[in-house]
Amino acid sequence: MSFENWVAYTYTPSMGAAVLFIILFAIITLLHTFHLFRTRTWFFIPLMIGGYFELVGYIGRAMSSKESPNWTIGPYVMQSTLLLVAPALFAASIYMELGRIILMVKGEHFSLVRVTWMTKIFVAGDVLSFLMQASGAGIMVSGSESSMSTGQNVIIGGLIVQIVFFGFFLVSAVVLQRRVAVHPYAAAVASEYPWNKHMWALHSSSILVLIRSVVRVVEYAQGTYGYLMSHEAFIYVFDGLLMFALMAIFIAIHPSEVNYHLGRGRAITAMGGLKVKDAAMV
């Protein structure tokens, strides 16, 4: 396959859907940016960057819609790559929050993985997944039939790595929550903190990423002319909508509260104000 007969989409991308998701991700990402700098919840920088990836990715889809049917490779690569790898950035922040929740409730002895290693292991898997997906996306647009197939296989491998690590992460989070809840002393300590709502935020966001990644594996396994890749609705329902919901969850249950209880600065209150643990630290 050469770029002379290259076809980006098997449908005409919807301008209306792209604009809607540009607006949605612009609003939610700007909110995360505002709260991140306001509360100094620095471990959520990857999630914020992932939001900008989503935003620019849907801008690429809008550009592709405007070009239809004479697509150029730039907007296609912009949307295909950024929308593909953004959840890996979300995952990095999610992994780091669990380690902080464990420290907050003093639950180190109840974790399947030592807290000192937890973030390193999960983030390392996340980086591997990110690199595999990004390189696979690059291989796919190199201009030959074999590179298209190779790129899809590399992307599938990266998505499977993401599923495996996220699956283990979800199991670790559930086991931790269960062990702390049934241990009298640990439960008493944990009850002093609003930790359960943050754990449920992690559970629900992890499930959203897992659903999205499984659908993506099926999509790339079917190939360019498969049912999922040939119908635009799937990218919005099983990717855009799920990832927007993930970002909305962390606006409703903002991780700054965990940092606050660790003595690391500010937290958003229910009334939208700020709680300050130590004025010298902010």
Image: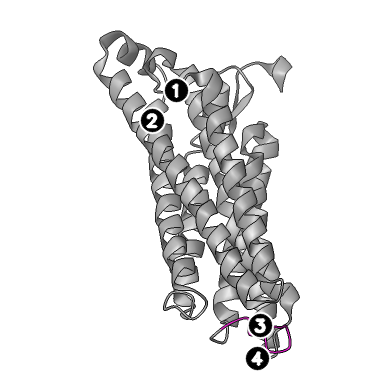
Residue 203 visible? yes
Q: Distance between the Cα atoms at labels 4 and 2?
A: 47 Å
Bin the neighbour count of mark 3 within 10 Å (Cα to Cα): few under 14, some 14-19, many 20 and up.
Answer: some
At 44% from the left and 15% from the top, the residue drawn is 108
In this view, the mark in front (1 or 3): 3
Q: Distance between the Cα atoms at labels 2 and 3?
A: 45 Å
Q: Earlier in the sequence, mark 1 or mark 4?
A: 4
In this view, the mark in front (1 or 4): 1
Instruction: Identify which amino acid the numbered label 4 is placed on.
Output: Pro
Residue 26 visible? no
Task: Give the residue pinned by disc 2.
Answer: 172
Numbered badge on residue 1: 3
Which quadrant of the rendered structure holds the C terminus? top right
The secondary structure that dominates the magenta segment is: loop
Q: Earlier in the sequence, mark 1 or mark 3?
A: 3
Marks 3/4 in contact by CB < 8 Å: the verdict is no
At 57% from the left and 48% from the top, the residue drawn is 129
Instruction: Identify which amino acid the numbered label 1 is placed on.
Output: Val
Which quadrant of the structure image shows residue 121?
Answer: top right
Instruction: Identify which amino acid the numbered label 2 is placed on.
Output: Ser
Task: Give the residue pinned by disc 4.
Answer: 69
Does 107 sit above or below residue 238? above
Q: Earlier in the sequence, mark 2 or mark 1?
A: 1
Which quadrant of the structure image shows residue 265?
Answer: top right
Task: Give the residue pinned by disc 1.
Answer: 113
At 60% from the left and 44% from the top, the residue drawn is 128
